[in-house]
Amino acid sequence: MAFVFAHRNPDSPQRLVRRFLVIPLFFVLVSVSDAATYTLAIEPSDSPSRLQQLYRPLADYLSRSTGETFEVQLAPNFLAYWQRVKKGGAYDFIIDSAHMTDYRIKEQKFVPLMRGAGNVTYSVVTLKSGAGTEAKALVGKNVASLGPPSMPYLLFHKLYPNPLRQPKLVPVEGASAAIDELRSNNAIAAVIPSQVAQHTDDVIVIAETEAVPNLALSASPTVPAHIQARVVEALNNASSDPEIVELLDQLGISEMTPVDAAQYQGQASLLEGMWGF
């Protein structure tokens, strides 16, 4: 029996077609694998579902604008968030309040990138039906607020320097939950952002905290400088994206502006006395 070996042309039309199909696919796979994934952490100032709804468009916008992938990361409450912040290395980008921003700049070498324009204050409110209540009368009474070490909690307790004469905390997930506790008579007062108080018809302001710098976005020192620059560029152009404009409006922020670490200097002192500070 004779065996006949057919000669295979290495450059046959079929093989050439396959080569030209594979080469573009290779470059597509390489470009996808080159895109890094970055975490975008948000302070737990509201329920996880609400924060995901608010900030998912921002993560998507940054992904489109930078060519990288951004994923929202949330903590269930401020104590869990504080523990993660102290450990360091858990987040790539973080949006949070002035005291946490200053802490990470000093202790973990985070780089401030952008901030919300202006300052923020928090209002202590009661229902209008309970008008006449004074802030000093809240000692020993239930007050709804985000828990420690959130900014509203820390600023509110500065109004009561005597550790033996403090209001009782009713911990909530956000401003709307605090108002619900008020309306349900589970709390006599609530601590909420002043811009929320201004748009809540059935409450009256009985005290207001000191003003502090607005929310800021900062980056871990492990994030490459060119990625940080892309994020800043994207946020500078964000006014053209209606979803980002809506987000800023929900947060009571008129615009994002450049930031200097000196603007937040000293804010971390609010954390003194907190476990692990």
Image (spheres, rainbow, N blue to C red):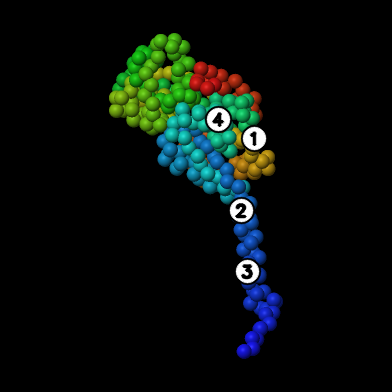
**Crowd band around label 2 with a 10 angstrom C-alpha radius: few (<14), some (14–19), many (20+):** few
Closer to us: 115 or 205: 115
In this view, 49 is above or below 267: below
State if disc 3 and disc 2 touch (CB < 8 Å). Answer: no
Give how far apart the Cα atoms at labels 4 and 1 are.
14 Å
In this view, 9 is above or below 165: below
Q: Does residue 259 appear in the picture of this structure?
A: no
Q: Please tell me the numbered disc located at residue 87.
A: 4
| Residue at which label 3 appears | 21
**Crowd band around label 4 with a 10 angstrom C-alpha radius: few (<14), some (14–19), many (20+):** few
Residue found at x 64% / y 33%: 111
Nearer-N-terminus badge (1/2) = 2
The C terminus lies in quadrant: top right
| Amino acid at the residue labelled 4 | Lys
Mark 2 secondary-structure assignment: helix
Q: Please tell me the numbered disc located at residue 221.
A: 1
| Amino acid at the residue labelled 1 | Pro
Give how far apart the Cα atoms at labels 1 and 3 are.
41 Å
**Crowd band around label 1 with a 10 angstrom C-alpha radius: few (<14), some (14–19), many (20+):** some
Q: Does residue 191 appear in the picture of this structure?
A: yes
Nearer-N-terminus badge (4/1) = 4
Nearer-N-terminus badge (3/4) = 3
In this view, 230 is above or below 131: below
| Amino acid at the residue labelled 3 | Leu
Mark 1 secondary-structure assignment: loop
Q: In the figure, is residue 228 to the left or right of 208?
A: right
State if disc 3 and disc 1 touch (CB < 8 Å). Answer: no
Q: Please tell me the numbered disc located at residue 33.
A: 2
Closer to us: 7 or 96: 7
